[in-house]
C-alpha cells in the first residue's frame, strides 16, 4: 500500500509541535511509523510506550490527516482510557489540537476524522475499515498491551486495510500474536523494536534493584519487566522451562554416590495416561520404561520385573498412591515390595510454606533445576519430561504455595504429568539423591555441619571430669 504523503514525520512533529524530548528508541520507532512500516514495540512498563510514543503517533496522524480514522484498542479498558486516552487529553491544550474534541475514549477533529477507543470485544467485530484516498482519509490501527489481546481479535482486524499499524506492549509469555511478531518469519514484515531499562534512564533504579534482589536476575518476572525478554511461562510454571533448557544445555557432572532409587507413576488405560518407571542414579535421571495397559495386575507385574532387574529394595522405591495408585501399592505389597506410598495431599514436612507434600517435592526439585544440580535424560522421553515439568502451574492459597491439580491441567488441554511425577518421586523421596539435605542445599548443609562440629567441640571442652558415656544396651 502506498504511504500517504505527510509534511512532517511523527518524531519531528512530536519534538516540535508537542514539545517532547524523545529518547533515541522513541525517535527511531516514530520515524518507522512515518515511513509506513507496520511497527511493533516491546518496552518495559513506565517507559513511555503508551503515554509518549502511541499518543504522539495518534496526534500526528490526526494533524496530518484531519479526516483520518484511527481505531485504538487494548487488552485492558482501564489501560486504554486511564493511560492512553488520558495522555491524548494532556495534549489538548497544544496549538495543533485546540479545535479538537476530547472525550473519555474518543478524539474528534472538526473535519470529521478522529480516534476511537474500542474494547477488545468491539474491536473483534470491526469490519469495512479501509482507506479512502479520494477524500484523504487514511486509517490507523493502534493496539496497546498487545500481549493480552487474543489471536482471534488480531485475525478480525487483519481483514481491514490499515494505512498505519502500531502494536505496543510490555513483554509476556512466549506465545500469541504479539510474541510471533518478533519471531521468523513474521518479523520480516514488521519493524520491531525491543527496549530495556537501560534505554529509559527515568525508570526507578531502586525498584529495579529491589525486584532483582527479591525475584532474582534470572527470574521470569525480572526479565519480562526490565529486559523485555519473553518468558516461556510468564512466571506461572512451577519449574521454569528456561531453567530446564539451561540445565539441558549445560548439565552438571554425574555424581553417582552409590545412591539408587526409583519412582513409579501408575495408570490403567490403553489410551492417554501412561505407567512410567524412572530411575535416579545419584543425580542422574533415567526414564527406564513407559507403557499403556488397562489391566493394573499386568502393570504391577511389569513394575516388579523392573525392581528385580535393577536390584531395588522396597525402601528405594516411591510410587503415587493417589486415586487408583493405592491399588498398585497393595498389589506390590502382596508381591513383597512395600514401597513408599506418596500422596500429593500428604502434609508437608515444613507446613509454613507449602500447602502439601506434593507441592513441596515439586518445589524442591525446581531448586535442584535452578541450581543445575541434576542430569536430565535425553531423547524423545527426555523432551516429554521437560515439557511436563514446565507445564504444571503454581499459585498461592492462604499464603502457601499450591500446585495445579491434574484436573485443572486437563481442563486447559495439558496432558497428565506422568513422566514428571515419576522423575520427581525417584529423585526426591525415599532414598533419592535429591532427598538428602546436603544435595538439596549444599552450602546451608555445610554451614549447619560446621556449626554442629563447633558445638560438639565446645561441649567436649566443658565436659565434667566425672562424665561417663551412657551404656548402649542394644548390643548386650
Image: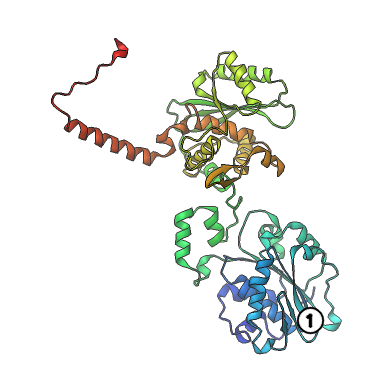
In the depicted structure, whether residue 96 falls above or below residue 87: below
Q: Residue 453: percent from the left, percent from the top?
A: 27, 34
The furthest residue to the front:
398
Residue 30 appears in the picture as rendered? no
The furthest residue to the left:
465
In the depicted structure, whether residue 102 falls above or below residue 209: below
In the depicted structure, whether residue 284 falls above or below residue 45: above
Taking the spot 50% from the left edge, 67% from the top edge, the residue there is 198
Q: Residue 304: percent from the left, percent from the top?
A: 60, 17
Dividing the picture into quadrants, the one containing residue 338 is top right
Compared across the picture, whether 18 is left or right of 141 comes to: left
Q: Residue 192: percent from the left, percent from the top?
A: 65, 66
Taking the spot 50% from the left edge, 69% from the top edge, the residue there is 203
Q: Residue 82: percent from the left, percent from the top?
A: 64, 71
Compared across the picture, whether 373 is left or right of 235 comes to: left
Q: Quadrant of the C terminus?
A: top left
Mark 1 secondary-structure assignment: loop
* Residue picked out by circle 1: 113
- Quick one: label 1, few (<14), some, or many (20+) residues within 10 Å? many
The furthest residue to the top:
476
Amino acid at each position: 500500500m502506498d504511504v500517504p504523503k505527510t509534511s512532517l514525520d511523527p518524531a519531528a512533529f512530536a519534538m516540535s509541535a508537542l514539545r517532547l524530548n524523545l529518547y533515541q528508541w522513541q525517535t527511531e520507532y516514530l520515524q518507522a511509523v512515518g515511513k509506513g512500516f507496520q511497527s511493533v514495540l516491546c518496552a518495559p512498563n513506565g517507559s513511555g510506550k503508551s503515554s509518549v510514543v502511541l499518543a504522539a503517533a495518534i496526534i500526528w496522524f490526526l494533524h496530518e490527516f484531519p479526516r483520518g480514522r484511527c481505531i485504538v484498542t487494548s487488552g485492558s479498558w482501564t489501560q486504554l482510557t486511564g493511560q492512553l486516552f488520558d495522555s491524548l487529553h494532556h495534549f489538548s491544550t497544544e496549538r495543533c489540537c485546540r479545535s479538537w474534541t476530547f472525550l473519555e475514549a474518543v478524539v474528534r477533529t472538526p473535519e470529521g476524522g478522529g480516534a476511537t477507543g474500542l474494547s477488545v470485544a468491539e474491536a473483534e467485530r470491526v469490519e469495512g475499515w479501509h482507506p479512502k484516498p479520494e477524500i484523504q482519509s487514511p486509517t490507523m490501527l493502534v493496539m496497546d498491551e498487545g500481549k493480552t489481546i487474543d489471536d482471534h481479535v488480531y485475525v478480525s482486524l487483519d481483514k481491514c486495510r490499515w494505512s498505519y499499524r502500531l502494536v505496543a506492549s510490555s513483554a509476556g509469555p512466549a506465545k500469541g500474536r504479539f510474541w510471533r511478531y518478533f519471531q521468523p518469519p513474521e518479523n520480516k514484515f514488521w519493524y520491531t523494536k525491543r527496549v530495556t531499562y537501560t534505554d529509559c534512564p527515568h525508570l526507578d533504579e531502586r525498584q529495579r534493584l529491589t525486584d532483582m534482589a527479591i525475584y532474582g536476575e534470572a527470574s521470569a518476572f525480572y526479565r519480562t519487566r526490565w529486559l523485555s525478554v519473553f518468558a516461556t511461562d510468564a512466571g506461572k510454571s512451577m519449574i521454569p522451562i528456561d531453567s530446564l533448557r539451561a540445565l539441558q544445555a549445560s548439565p552438571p557432572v554425574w555424581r553417582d554416590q552409590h545412591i539408587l532409587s526409583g519412582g513409579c507413576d501408575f495408570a490403567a488405560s490403553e489410551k492417554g495416561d501412561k505407567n512410567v518407571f524412572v530411575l535416579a542414579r545419584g543425580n542422574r535421571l533415567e526414564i527406564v520404561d513407559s507403557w499403556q495397559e488397562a489391566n493394573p495386575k499386568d502393570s504391577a507385574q511389569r513394575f516388579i520385573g523392573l525392581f528385580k532387574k535393577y536390584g531395588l529394595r522396597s525402601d528405594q522405591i516411591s510410587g503415587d498412591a493417589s486415586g487408583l495408585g493405592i491399588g498398585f501399592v497393595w498389589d506390590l505389597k502382596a508381591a513383597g515390595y512395600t514401597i513408599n506410598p506418596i500422596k500429593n495431599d500428604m502434609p508437608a514436612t515444613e507446613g509454613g510454606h507449602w500447602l502439601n507434600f506434593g507441592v513441596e517435592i515439586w518445589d524442591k526439585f525446581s531448586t535442584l533445576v535452578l541450581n543445575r544440580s541434576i542430569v536430565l535424560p535425553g531423547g524423545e522421553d527426555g523432551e516429554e519430561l521437560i515439557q511436563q515439568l514446565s507445564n504444571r502451574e503454581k499459585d498461592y492459597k492462604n499464603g502457601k504455595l499450591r500446585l495445579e491439580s491434574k484436573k485443572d491441567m486437563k481442563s486447559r488441554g495439558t496432558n497428565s504429568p506422568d513422566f514428571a511425577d515419576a522423575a520427581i518421586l525417584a529423585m526426591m523421596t525415599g532414598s533419592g539423591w535429591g532427598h538428602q539435605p546436603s544435595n538439596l542445599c549444599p552450602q546451608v548443609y555445610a554451614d549447619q555441619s560446621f556449626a554442629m562440629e563447633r558445638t560438639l567441640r565446645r561441649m567436649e571442652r566443658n565436659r565434667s571430669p566425672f562424665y561417663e558415656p551412657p551404656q548402649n544396651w542394644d548390643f548386650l
